[in-house]
Image (cartoon, rainbow, N blue to C red):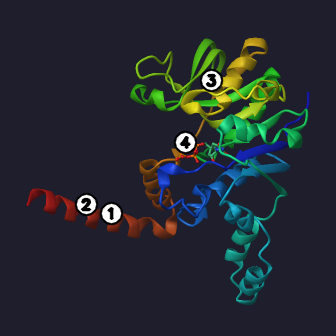
Amino acid sequence: MKKIKKAVIPAAGLGTRFLPATKAMPKEMLPIIDKPTIQYIVEEAIESGIEDLIIVTGKGKRAIEDHFDNAFELEYRLMDAEKLDLLTEVQRSSSIDIHYIRQKEPKGLGHAIWCARRFIDDEPFAVLLGDDIVVAEEPCLKQLMTHYEETNASVIGVQKVPEHQTHRYGIIDYAEQMGRLYEVNRFIEKPKQGSAPSNLAIMGRYILKPEIFDYLDMQEKGAGGEIQLTDAIQKMNEIDSVYAYNFEGTRYDVGEKLGFILTSIQFALHNEELRDSVIQGLKEILDEETIYMLS
Ligand code: UTP
């Protein structure tokens, strides 16, 4: 069985949910506290043992390439000023080989992955989406890799979502459950409200066998007129079993405004330097709001 060494991070979407901030700045560069969301994802890939990363970018995404480049002048100045903690942080983002490929038009997630087919060749590979940050004792991607090694099948990361939210996600209809691992009957992208067969939703982490490209090659459009990765996974599942794994850890949805704001607050509360002042600041804001609402 081939080891998972390569990962794809698609980052060529338009980021419409964050307009106008994303008109000239990639959504993936929006920071949670002081770290761009894409860096959390790159760090998870590194901690999971990924050796080669490819980021699929598009128009207006140069800031991502600049971010992961070496910054000699900045590093020199930090060293000179003996700001070694900051130096380590700055160097952390340039410690892995990252390759870039462009998706010329944002035709959907499935199309973005298809753009990386020559880089992947005929190896199994990982996909990580920047919309979900996962905090877990064992990195989320590593958990999926372990189950890929056990099953020798593609494994898709899922977690439970409230039933009223299932229409926003790719949902699984499962046949059999073995602990946290599920044998899947069907993968359905954004089922109509009230029609989802379960509340287990695909969460932006995938281990895929290279056969997925046979199905992405068809370039069929699905929900929203986009080429959907979930549809290709479902087609592959009809021939070669695909599993879902309900991974352990807390998942933070940073792909939409409310999730982004709440994640920023939670990460600040978990940050020793910020925690007390943030609690104090939040109390003052809430007191003021209560007075305003009562008046
Ligand atoms: P999203 O749908 O969450 O990202 O796609 P988006 O399209 O940028 O955001 P909204 O919905 O307009 O606000 C999930 C991931 O897939 C990438 C995105 O960059 C994001 O990281 N993606 C999506 C592509 O790379 N290409 C596409 O054509 C679509």
x%, y% of residue 250?
A: 54, 42
Q: Quick one: which residue is furthest to the left in this view?
A: 295
Give the quarter of the figure containing the C terminus: bottom left
Q: In terms of depth relative to the viewer, which is nearer, 112 or 143?
A: 112
CB under 8 Å between discs 1 and 2: yes
Q: Label 1 to label 2, Cα distance in Å? A: 6 Å
Would residue 38 appear left or right of 191 to someone viewing this image? right
Ligand 1 appears in which quadrant?
top right
Local secondary structure at mark 4: strand
| Tag 3 residue | 180
Picture disc at residue 282: 1
| Tag 4 residue | 251
Q: In terms of depth relative to the viewer, which is nearer, 181 or 102?
A: 102
Picture disc at residue 108: none
Would residue 261 appear left or right of 137 to someone viewing this image? left
Answer yes or no: disc 2 within 8 Å of ligand 1: no
**Amino acid residing under circle 3:** Arg
Q: In terms of depth relative to the viewer, which is nearer, 213 or 180?
A: 213
x%, y% of residue 34?
A: 57, 67
Picture disc at residue 286: 2
Q: Earlier in the sequence, mark 3 or mark 4?
A: 3
Would residue 101 appear left or right of 105 to someone viewing this image? right
- Residue at left offset 75%, top offset 15%: 241
